[in-house]
Image (tube, rainbow, N blue to C red):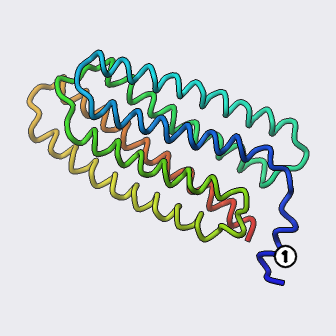
Amino acid sequence: MNIDKFLKFFVPKDHSFFPLFESGAHNLVKASELLKELMASKGFEEHEKLFKEIKDVEHIGDDLTNEIYDQLNKSFITPFDREDIHELASNIDDIVDSINGIGRRICLYKPKKMIPLYEEMSKVIYEAAKEIEAAIYCLRDPITNKKKIAQTCENVTAIEHKADELYYVGISELFEKEEDPKELIKNNKILETLERCVDEEEDVTDTLKAILIKMA
């Protein structure tokens, strides 16, 4: 018998967490879609409308995270380590919180212009969110899907490197071209939050890789 198939017999059959994680990943993708729309939109009213939608999605994410924690407290057998379940739920929640924070900053700071890098970074966040969603759906059978999960983790790492480059080039251009100190501070803070959001997406892959290692 193939060793992978043999190991599958030792994976607990409690599947109650998987729908919650999948809903959380889908919710993350929805939040990142709305962020893309917000960054591509113009006008305070449109920003406020989209931020309200992001905030609603963030509340859904909080509820899903709390459901996972509640289920963790009630479950005797879990599909993988309890610490990893807690960390994965927290990682996903952190990203959605950051997306909400980005939208909040746009509405509070009201930058005079939406610099092109905002939209570029939001596309990168969405791209990484889709990779995370794909990996989460593979967790129902991590041993069979370990190569797919590992590949999505590599993809997110590559996306994070791309985001770093965009961020540093964008910051350089911002300090070179922006003459209004207030706008400089606003844009710098927004860009920092965008970059941190992609870092948090990579944090998810660290947890996924830990899960794979423990099942190897």
User: Disc 1 on helix, strand or loop?
Assistant: helix
Q: Identify the image quadrant of the C terminus.
A: bottom right
Q: Identify the image quadrant of the N terminus.
A: bottom right
- Based on the displayed image, in which of its 4 quarters is residue 193 positioned? top left
Q: Residues within 10 Å of mark 1 (few under 14, many from 20)?
A: few
Q: Residue at x 28, y 20 (%)?
A: 109
Rendered location of residue 151, percent (x, y)? 53, 67
Amino acid type at circle 1 is: Phe
Rendered location of residue 20, percent (x, y)? 70, 40
Rendered location of residue 63, percent (x, y)? 66, 27
Tag 1 residue: 6
Left or right for 66, reference 61: right
For this rendering, which residue is in front, 22 or 77? 22
Left or right for 206, reference 75: left
Q: How many marks?
A: 1
Rendered location of residue 184, percent (x, y)? 19, 30
- Based on the displayed image, in which of its 4 quarters is residue 91 positioned? top right
**Can you say whether 83 is above or below 158 in the image?**
above
For this rendering, which residue is in front, 66 or 214? 66
Q: Residue at x 84, y 76 (%)?
A: 6
